[in-house]
Amino acid sequence: MPKILVYNNNLNRMETYNRNLSDSMPYNVNRTLTVKEFRGSSTSNILWTDKRTMQSWNNFRKLYGRGIYVGYAFKRAWEGGHSNLSQHYAGVAFDVAQNLSESARNSLRRLAISSRILEICGAER
């Protein structure tokens, strides 16, 4: 059972949750992101994120109106990823929509940019 640490930005403190892989992530609405999806291929039983990230996911997912495949949202640097490039899956940036066509991914990207919901995570305009 993974332990999930969530930084609560409103209270300026860490919160700890113990969840099964099939459970929803803390602060997740309508079960759109399970612990298993969030963890991806990481073998860690300690995961972390922040409340703002979960709220942004909820808002963007609601705006999109349908499921969004999540490949990774958490991965420790030594567990692989983009090889010698960036390791940005530390619970606040999601690798999504790899199962969509290029045009569908571009549409999703344009929605993310125009909505400004994900700007806290550094989405460029």
Image (tube, grey):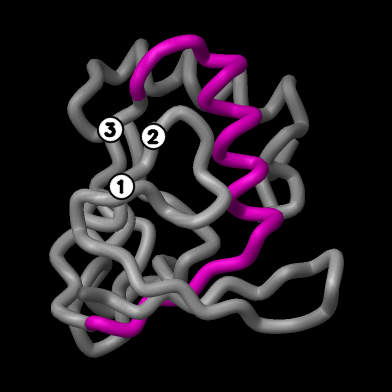
Does 64 lie within the magenta span? yes
Q: Which residues are magenta?
A: 45-67
Q: Which disc, if any, is residue 118?
A: none
Q: Residue at x 75, y 52 (%)?
A: 120
Q: Residue shown at 35%/67% (left/top)? A: 74
> In what quadrant of the picture does the C terminus appear?
top right
Q: Determine which of the numbered discs, if any, sits on residue 34 in the image.
A: 1
Residue 57 image point, x, y percent = 56, 39
Q: Quadrant of the N terminus?
A: bottom left
Label 1, residues with CA under 10 Å away: few <14, some 14-19, many ≥20: some
Which of the marked residues, 1 or 3, is nearer the chain's N terminus? 1
Residue under label 2: 31
Contact, mark 1 vs mark 2 (Cβ under 8 Å): yes
Q: Amino acid at mark 1?
A: Thr
Secondary element type, mark 1? loop
Which type of secondary structure does the marked residue at label 2 adopt? loop
Q: Which residue is drawn at the image coordinates 24% and 34% (left, top)?
A: 98
Instruction: Find the distance from the CA under tag 1 to the CA under tag 3.
Output: 11 Å
- Nearest to the eye among marks 1 and 3: give it: 1
Which is more foreground, mark 3 or mark 2?
2
Residue 19: image location, x then y, percent: 31, 65
Q: Please, what is the three-letter code of the amino acid marked with disc 3?
A: Tyr
